[in-house]
Image: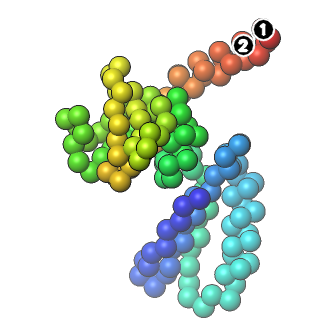
Amino acid sequence: MTHRVRRQGRTVELGLVVDRPESGVDLAACERIARRLNAALETYSEPYTLAVESAGLDRPLVRPSDYERFRDRNVKIVTTVAIDGRKTHRGRLTGVRGSSAAVTVDGRDVLLPLDAIKSANIDFDIRADLTRAKRERHARKNR
């Protein structure tokens, strides 16, 4: 779960991105969380806006555990410094090794220090996702 709070004129903007490791988050869960937060904020005297959303298909990788959770997925990682001659790294996530994210880029293993990562997201490709789902259904059917 990540959050953001910022002042926009006279209004405070509150944003919350929620995720559930085993199943993700659907619209109903976001609505339940928003209702509870609004009830808790009823006594808040300043005007505010609240946005509760799921992490989405291109979900950010925030914690080291995220790099393990989404192992074998395609990712886009932007670093603050050039590593291996580039700042943007697209490839297959292979997990965490020590204090670095391990990514296979163009057939080569690259270690990206976690403290040098500016942003990291799942690089969602609908075709690859549909192909993977089809393969998984076929494997289950043939068990």
The residue positioned 49% from the left and 73% from the top of the image is 5
- Binning the other alpha carbons within 10 Å of mark 1 as few (below 14), some (14 to 19) or many (20 upward) gives few
Please report contact status of discs 2 and 1: CB closer than 8 Å, yes or no: yes
Residue at the disc numbered 2:
139
Q: Residue at x 39, y 43 (%)?
A: 100
Residue at screen point 44% across, 79% down: 7
Element under disc 2:
helix
Q: Is residue 59 visible?
A: no
Q: From the image, which quarter does the C terminus lie in?
A: top right
Q: What's the amino acid at mark 2?
A: Ala
Can the viewer see residue 55?
yes
Relative image position of residue 109 (x, y in whole percent): 36, 27
Question: Residue extending furthest front?
Answer: 98
Q: In the rendered image, which quarter is residue 37 located in?
A: bottom right
Res. 22 image quadrant: top right
Q: Residues within 10 Å of mark 2 (few under 14, many from 20)?
A: few
In the rendered view, does 49 fall on the left or right side of 143?
left
**What separation in Å lies between label 2 and label 1 (alpha carbons)?**
5 Å
Up-down: is 25 above or below 30? above
Element marked by disc 1: loop
In this rendered view, identify the residue nearer to me: 14 or 104: 104
Indicate whether 79 appears above or below 7.
above
**In the image, farthest residue toward the top:** 142
The quarter of the image holding the N terminus is: bottom right
In the image, taking residue 110 as reference, residue 40 lies left or right, namely right
Residue located 46% across and 33% down the image: 93
Residue 94: horizontal and vertical position, in percent? 47, 31
What x and y, as percent, mark residue 72? 52, 29
The residue identified by callout 1 is 142
Where is residue 42? Give x, y as percent: 69, 84
Q: Amino acid at mark 1?
A: Asn
